[in-house]
Image (tube, helix red, strand yellow):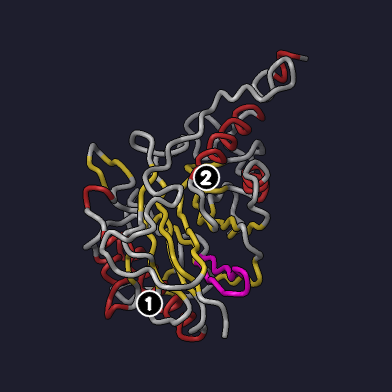
Amino acid sequence: MCGLLLAFAGCEGRDPQILPTPDAGPCISGACTTPDSGTPIGSGTRVRIAAFNVHRLFDTVCDSGSCGGSNYEELPTATEFAQQAERLARAIAALNADVVLLEEVETQTSLDELQRRIPGFGFAQLGEIGTAASVDVAVLSRHPITDVRRHRDRSIVRPDGSFTRFSRELLEVHVDVGGAEAIVFAAHFRSKVDDDPGRRIAEATASRDIVSGVAKASPGALVVFGGDLNDVPGSDALNALERDGALLRVASDRPASETWTYVYSGQRQAIDHLYLAPATEGGTYVPGSFRVAREGNGYGGSDHCAVFADFLVEPAP
């Protein structure tokens, strides 16, 4: 019996604490109360929002019928699944965030396993697209979720005029932060494996229009969009998001040397992002608060680093 339980609790039933809490970077405990730019922070409730690609959090059920080995769908043992979830949970807890946008969560079982290991995150939503072995977006929140909307069925247009749709769900989640409204969008754009850059540009253009439209319809809300967008600042996709000042990439006030989140072919790239819809009166970004949490080239066992930033949300008048 002791051998069976060793990976979880040790022979005396105690947590062996074999997974240390990761270093989530500077400002994690509020050390950045004075913005780097010197701009006054203002009033309102401070909310920390993070985005984190957890890297293929597959559960223990083979949905595709072809699992393990060189197949796309991994099939972890119960012990391996628990260990991955525990390591990720510790990493997420260390961010000290109020809302976390997640990418690459396979199923509700995966999300449940993660959520139950992080104290304080009483609310969660999965953006399941319903295909076998899909790795989906999700949202974890310390505050009540009041509304959820999905946008993946929307037809979107590539630059060449052909139609496609979002690679994963564009998950819109409304959160009640002590009487103030925050609206977050969790996204995961098309990857560059067998690349289809036109689809990523279509996703970005449609996301800009959707997020901007929601912000205009909810002027009293804080509206934040983010996730693994699989493209870097200055790319056509991110330029589409930022066109005409529709969305503000909050990392733009940090040195580029500090904002990378992924290493590809030895090159550090910033592909995980947070954006603010600035056309609202209900929320603002705390200047200088954007940070990247990393352990080596990733974070919490993922091949991606996590990003987080602080915002102010104003209560409804």
Q: Give the quarter of the image for residue 130.
A: bottom right
- Label 1 neighbourhood size at 10 Å, few (<14), some (14-19), many (20+)? many
Identify which residue is drawn at 59% across, 35% down: 86
Picture disc at residue 194: none
Image spot of residue 226 (x, y percent):
43, 62
For badge 2, the amino acid type reads Ile
Q: Quarter of the image containing the N terminus?
A: top right
Q: What stretch is highlighted in magenta?
A: 170-184
Q: Which amino acid does label 1 sit on?
A: Pro
Let me know if residue 249 is in the magenta part: no
Relative side of 239 to 76, left or right: left
Quadrant containing the C terminus is bottom right
> What residue does disc 1 label?
278
Task: Provide residue 286's location: percent of width, then percent of height.
Answer: 38, 65
The 10 Å Cα crowd at callout 2, few under 14, some 14 to 19, many 20 or more, is: many
Work out how far the residue at label 1 is from the one at label 2, CA to CA, in angstroms.
Answer: 27 Å
Q: Is residue 224 above or below residue 56?
A: below
Residue 98 position within the rendered picture, expressed as x and y whole percent measured from the top left: 54, 57
Q: What element carries label 1?
A: loop
Q: Name the residue under label 2.
A: 92
